[in-house]
Image (cartoon, rainbow, N blue to C red):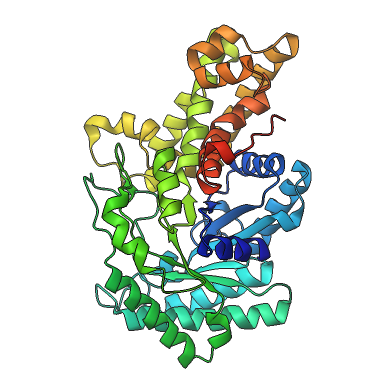
Amino acid sequence: MKALLDLVARHRSGEPVGIASICSAHPVVLDAALIHARDGGRPVLIEATSNQVNQFGGYTGMRPADFHAFVMDKADRAGLAREQVLLGGDHLGPNAWQDESAASAMAKSDVLIDEYVAAGFRKIHLDCSMSCADDPAVLADTEVAARAARLAAVAERAWKRSGGEAPVYIVGTEVPVPGGAKEELDELQVTRPEAMAATIEAHRKAFTEHGLDDAWQRVIGLVVQPGVEFDHHDVVDFKPEKARALSAAIEPFPGLVYEAHSTDYQTPEALAALVRGHFAILKVGPGVTYALRETLWALSFIEDEVVGAGERSGLRSIVLYVMRAEPNYWNKYYTDESRLMLDLQYSLSDRVRYYWAHPKIREACDVLLRNLNEIASKDELPLVLLSQYLPRQYEDVRTGRLTNSVDSIVRSGVTHVLRQYAQACVGGPEKYAWNRK
């Protein structure tokens, strides 16, 4: 975690630097993030959420040790040194077990934290803000902080048992809805500075009461609401003037920065403004898988033009068929039947991301890439079709910034998003060197 601690220290010394946190388990997203880090000569922060990865496998089927091995194997293949890969756990707490009693959910959270830290995850977001089945609708700050401190104690024991670097912690309660809001949004209430200060004090006191003064020195970030979010079709953009008081309020707390969730789809200018406002850790998840879906959709349209009807993958129709047949990942989100087909494919909340590992969809992706690789092996993907369906990639191929290969083009949409974050996190495009490998 030295790279992350150094970055926080540089930020607090006055440099407008930050880091993107890639919250995804998709293999193509991870490959793109690792290669982008390798080519840029910088570390990469990758985080798993408690729903994706937990002691029961999560929706990826991976436990923390599995995810650690999965990412590190990809780093080896990408040629990125393992010490450049920072692994974190997001929303670690009772989030996945909110329908159980607090006692049961917290007992499972203890095991969750222990497995994450023992597996080598060292950036730990302690999130106990959600109510469990027998809790009041809204938990008091003191109860949230007490539960977070309990989990920090578990993390400290796991670290001392397993060895290695000491973990660093993120705390905070005002977290946007994971994966985007269900309802349409116009504007959000920015966290009040006094509420932010109360959250810090409640957690500091709870850590002290649990004998965790040393661990408190490794709390580096606080989750607040800077006024950013997205719903199915729209984005609430960051407005620096509305967060000015909140940005200033962190300055009396040395060693702390803000962590901004749901920064997906923010403009490059907004991302840079967030970093300047002390939101030095920028979380992105659906935004990168959405970019991947856009690219695969475009490639499937190219396939329609160059591959015979009987040999095509049918990727788009297969994805929609599987999603309609197995609606459990979207039916609580997409409730307007009149625009269901639009939402299934194009909603910014990107519920498609839960389906990529489905055997039928994985097979369709394999057929799509095999068909296009066969076309490319004879020559290249036709530039006229790149221009039609992937115009940004067409320009990058023409100028030599992107190779005209299927693998490079599949990653390119994700890389474009990562590049926007990288530019925002180093002080702007003029300070960002794009290695053209």
**Horizontal and vertical percent position of residue 363:** 61, 31
Question: In the drawing, does residue 87 fall left or right of residue 210?
Answer: right
Quadrant assignment for the C terminus:
top right
Between residues 131 and 29, which one lies in front from this camera angle?
A: 29
Q: Quick check: 143 above or below 62?
A: below
**Horizontal and vertical percent position of residue 297:** 49, 24
**Horizontal and vertical percent position of residue 339:** 26, 31
Quadrant assignment for the N terminus:
bottom right
Image mark count: 0
**Horizontal and vertical percent position of residue 268:** 44, 39
Name the quadrant containing residue 83.
Answer: bottom right
Residue 102 visible = no
Please report the residue visible at 30 percent of the width from the left and 53 percent of the height from the top: 227
Name the quadrant containing residue 379.
Answer: top right
Q: Quick check: 87 above or below 349?
A: below
Please report the residue visible at 35 percent of the width from the left and 36 percent of the height from the top: 347
Between residues 302 and 202, which one lies in front from this camera angle?
A: 202
Q: Quick check: 244 above or below 399?
A: below
